[in-house]
Amino acid sequence: MAEKHIDIAGATSIKCTAREAANYDLIVTNSSGCSTVSANTKVTKSCFVSAAGEEVASSAKTNSTIEILLYPNPANGPVPVSYKSDTNRRIVINVYDIAGRIVFSNTLDAKQGRNVFNINLASLLSGSYFFELNAGSQQARVNFMIE
Protein backbone atom coordinates (compact mmCIF):
# COMPACT_ATOMS: atom_id res chain seq x y z
CA MET A 1 0.00 0.00 0.00
CA ALA A 2 1.41 3.39 -0.94
CA GLU A 3 2.05 5.94 1.77
CA LYS A 4 -0.18 8.99 1.71
CA HIS A 5 0.99 12.20 3.39
CA ILE A 6 -1.58 14.92 3.99
CA ASP A 7 -0.46 18.33 5.20
CA ILE A 8 -2.99 20.18 7.31
CA ALA A 9 -2.38 23.80 6.34
CA GLY A 10 -2.38 26.18 9.29
CA ALA A 11 -2.77 23.39 11.87
CA THR A 12 -1.67 24.77 15.22
CA SER A 13 -3.35 22.48 17.72
CA ILE A 14 -3.02 18.83 18.73
CA LYS A 15 -6.46 17.94 17.36
CA CYS A 16 -6.81 16.29 13.99
CA THR A 17 -9.72 14.40 12.51
CA ALA A 18 -9.48 11.08 10.72
CA ARG A 19 -11.95 11.27 7.84
CA GLU A 20 -11.62 7.59 6.92
CA ALA A 21 -10.75 4.29 8.54
CA ALA A 22 -7.02 3.63 7.97
CA ASN A 23 -3.64 3.29 9.68
CA TYR A 24 -2.14 6.66 10.63
CA ASP A 25 1.23 8.03 11.73
CA LEU A 26 1.05 11.65 12.82
CA ILE A 27 4.10 13.73 11.92
CA VAL A 28 4.44 16.91 13.96
CA THR A 29 6.87 19.58 12.77
CA ASN A 30 7.61 22.72 14.79
CA SER A 31 8.47 26.16 13.44
CA SER A 32 12.19 25.27 13.52
CA GLY A 33 11.62 22.34 11.17
CA CYS A 34 12.16 19.61 13.80
CA SER A 35 9.77 16.67 13.43
CA THR A 36 8.58 13.72 15.47
CA VAL A 37 6.41 10.77 14.43
CA SER A 38 3.70 9.16 16.56
CA ALA A 39 3.15 5.44 17.01
CA ASN A 40 1.05 3.86 14.27
CA THR A 41 -2.65 4.05 15.10
CA LYS A 42 -5.42 2.17 13.35
CA VAL A 43 -8.65 4.18 13.11
CA THR A 44 -11.51 1.75 12.69
CA LYS A 45 -14.25 4.36 12.50
CA SER A 46 -13.85 8.00 11.56
CA CYS A 47 -14.06 10.41 14.48
CA PHE A 48 -16.49 13.01 13.26
CA VAL A 49 -20.25 13.45 13.18
CA SER A 50 -21.85 12.73 9.86
CA ALA A 51 -24.24 15.13 8.18
CA ALA A 52 -27.04 12.84 9.38
CA GLY A 53 -25.89 13.44 12.99
CA GLU A 54 -25.17 9.77 13.73
CA GLU A 55 -23.31 8.95 16.95
CA VAL A 56 -19.66 8.19 16.38
CA ALA A 57 -16.88 6.71 18.48
CA SER A 58 -13.15 7.15 18.84
CA SER A 59 -11.07 4.05 18.69
CA ALA A 60 -7.42 3.14 18.69
CA LYS A 61 -5.40 0.00 18.13
CA THR A 62 -1.64 0.29 18.24
CA ASN A 63 1.05 -2.02 16.95
CA SER A 64 1.24 -3.56 20.43
CA THR A 65 -2.30 -5.02 19.96
CA ILE A 66 -4.02 -2.97 22.68
CA GLU A 67 -7.50 -1.97 21.57
CA ILE A 68 -9.84 0.61 23.15
CA LEU A 69 -13.17 2.14 22.16
CA LEU A 70 -14.52 5.29 23.78
CA TYR A 71 -18.08 6.39 23.02
CA PRO A 72 -20.01 8.53 22.34
CA ASN A 73 -17.67 11.15 20.97
CA PRO A 74 -18.33 13.93 21.79
CA ALA A 75 -19.35 12.93 25.32
CA ASN A 76 -21.59 14.81 27.70
CA GLY A 77 -21.97 12.45 30.66
CA PRO A 78 -20.53 9.16 31.89
CA VAL A 79 -18.20 7.75 29.24
CA PRO A 80 -18.19 3.99 28.59
CA VAL A 81 -14.76 2.73 27.58
CA SER A 82 -14.42 -0.70 26.01
CA TYR A 83 -11.05 -2.43 26.28
CA LYS A 84 -10.06 -5.85 24.96
CA SER A 85 -7.43 -7.52 27.14
CA ASP A 86 -5.38 -10.57 26.18
CA THR A 87 -4.98 -11.51 29.88
CA ASN A 88 -6.13 -10.62 33.40
CA ARG A 89 -4.17 -7.50 34.33
CA ARG A 90 -4.15 -4.21 36.16
CA ILE A 91 -4.59 -1.19 33.89
CA VAL A 92 -4.13 2.52 34.45
CA ILE A 93 -6.33 5.03 32.68
CA ASN A 94 -5.43 8.71 32.41
CA VAL A 95 -7.26 11.60 30.82
CA TYR A 96 -5.17 14.59 29.68
CA ASP A 97 -6.36 18.07 28.82
CA ILE A 98 -5.08 19.87 25.74
CA ALA A 99 -2.16 21.29 27.76
CA GLY A 100 -1.01 17.75 28.68
CA ARG A 101 -2.10 17.88 32.33
CA ILE A 102 -3.64 14.75 33.88
CA VAL A 103 -7.24 15.68 34.78
CA PHE A 104 -8.44 12.16 35.64
CA SER A 105 -6.61 8.98 36.64
CA ASN A 106 -7.75 5.57 37.84
CA THR A 107 -6.31 2.07 38.26
CA LEU A 108 -8.62 -0.83 37.39
CA ASP A 109 -8.47 -4.61 37.12
CA ALA A 110 -9.24 -5.92 33.63
CA LYS A 111 -10.19 -9.50 32.88
CA GLN A 112 -9.18 -11.44 29.78
CA GLY A 113 -11.54 -10.53 26.92
CA ARG A 114 -13.80 -7.51 26.48
CA ASN A 115 -14.09 -5.12 29.45
CA VAL A 116 -16.34 -2.07 29.70
CA PHE A 117 -15.59 0.65 32.25
CA ASN A 118 -17.73 3.73 32.85
CA ILE A 119 -15.70 6.79 33.72
CA ASN A 120 -17.34 9.88 35.16
CA LEU A 121 -15.88 13.00 33.57
CA ALA A 122 -18.76 15.32 34.54
CA SER A 123 -16.34 17.68 36.31
CA LEU A 124 -14.43 18.42 33.09
CA LEU A 125 -15.05 21.54 31.03
CA SER A 126 -16.08 21.35 27.38
CA GLY A 127 -13.10 20.79 25.10
CA SER A 128 -10.65 18.34 23.59
CA TYR A 129 -9.01 15.62 25.71
CA PHE A 130 -6.82 12.53 25.32
CA PHE A 131 -7.80 9.22 26.93
CA GLU A 132 -4.83 6.96 27.63
CA LEU A 133 -4.90 3.32 28.69
CA ASN A 134 -1.71 1.69 30.04
CA ALA A 135 -1.57 -2.09 30.39
CA GLY A 136 1.91 -3.23 31.32
CA SER A 137 4.22 -2.35 28.42
CA GLN A 138 1.25 -1.61 26.14
CA GLN A 139 -0.32 1.82 25.73
CA ALA A 140 -3.07 3.32 23.59
CA ARG A 141 -4.38 6.87 23.30
CA VAL A 142 -7.51 8.26 21.74
CA ASN A 143 -8.66 11.85 21.33
CA PHE A 144 -12.20 12.75 22.38
CA MET A 145 -14.38 15.77 23.04
CA ILE A 146 -16.51 16.81 26.02
CA GLU A 147 -19.58 18.88 25.14
Image: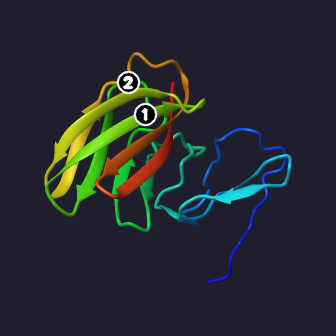
In this rendering, position of residue 145 left or right of residue 122: right
Q: Secondary structure at mark 2?
A: loop
The image position of residue 136, as x and y in percent, is 28, 54
- The image quadrant that residue 117 belongs to is top left
Is residue 104 rendered to the left or right of residue 91?
A: right
Residue drawn 17% across and 52% down?
89
- Kindly identify the residue that appears in the image at 30 percent across and 37 percent down: 80
Q: CA distance from mark 2 to mark 1?
A: 9 Å
Q: Does 46 sit left or right of 119 as displayed? A: right
Q: Which mark is residue 121?
A: 2
- Amino acid type at image mark 1: Val
Q: Vertical placement of 63 versus 98: above or below?
A: below
Q: Report helix, strand or loop for mark 1.
A: strand
Where is residue 67 shown, x and y percent of the image?
Answer: 35, 58
Q: Residue at x 45, y 48 (%)?
A: 141
Q: Is 97 positioned to the left or the right of 27 in the image? A: left
Q: Does the residue at mark 2 contact the one at mark 1 (Cβ under 8 Å)? A: yes
Query: Which residue was labeled with disc 1?
Result: 95
Vertical comparison of 64 with 8: above or below = below
